[in-house]
Structures are given as structure tokens and as C-alpha cells.
Image (spheres, helix red, strand yellow):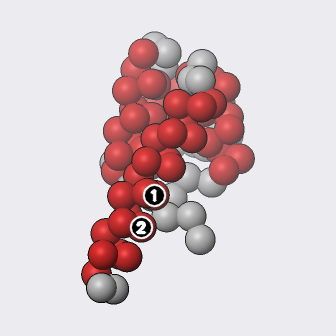
């Protein structure tokens, strides 16, 4: 199961959105949502981002795919280390 720090990914995505010069409302509209609340929840780490949505954001924000993968995998690595060290 993929587990990651939603707040860390959300902060990363917010930074990338701002760099791309987009508002939460603009992104929500491109994704077919009537409210920017969905984007806000992702950026604050309250919601799990669907992979399909992540793929759209990577494209819209012009993010290098490897950077997104690294961000998620680094987070997953830390979570796994934390949980595995408790088992000792």
C-alpha cells in the first residue's frame, strides 16, 4: 500500500501551482470542479489525491515527473522506516 505524507505533497503541489501562475479556482475549473475547495484540501494535506488528478496537475503545472515521484517515495521511505523501527 502506498502511504505518503499528504501535507508534504500538498505543500509541494501548492508551490508548483503558484510557480505556474495558477489559482486554486483555475485549477479546480480545469479539473471540472465548481469549487476550489478540492484543490485546497489537497494542498493542505486533508485529501488523498487521486492518481488521475495528480497526472493532470503534473501536466498543468509543468512539473518534472521524476520530481513528483521522488517527493512521494522519499515520504514513503520515511514512513516505512518509522514503522519498521517500532517493530524492533
* Secondary element at tag 2: helix
- Specify the quadrant that holds the N terminus: bottom right
Residue 23 seen: no
Image check: 82 left or right of 64?
A: left
Residue at image coords 53%, 31%: 67
Where does the image place residue 37, in percent across and percent down from the top left? 44, 47
> Which residue in the protein does label 1 denote?
76
Q: Nearer the viewer, residue 23 or 69?
A: 69
* Secondary element at tag 1: helix
Q: Nearer the viewer, residue 78 or 28?
A: 78
Res. 35 mark: none
> Which residue in the protein does label 2 denote?
80
Residue at image coords 45%, 24%: 16
Cα separation, mark 2 vs mark 1, equals 6 Å
Q: Nearer the viewer, residue 35 or 78?
A: 78
Where does the image place residue 10, in percent across and percent down from the top left? 40, 43
Establish if 84 lies above or below 80: below
| Tag 2 and tag 1, C-beta contact below 8 Å | yes
Amino acid at each position: 500500500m502506498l502511504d505518503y505524507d499528504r501535507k508534504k505533497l500538498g505543500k509541494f503541489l501548492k508551490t508548483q501551482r503558484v510557480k505556474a501562475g495558477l489559482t486554486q479556482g483555475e485549477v479546480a475549473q480545469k479539473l471540472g470542479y465548481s469549487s476550489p475547495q478540492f484543490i485546497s484540501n489537497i494542498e493542505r494535506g486533508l485529501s488523498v489525491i487521486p492518481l488521475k488528478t495528480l497526472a493532470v496537475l503534473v501536466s498543468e503545472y509543468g512539473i518534472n515527473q521524476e520530481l513528483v515521484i521522488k517527493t512521494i517515495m522519499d515520504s514513503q521511505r520515511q514512513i516505512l522506516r518509522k514503522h519498521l523501527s517500532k517493530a524492533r
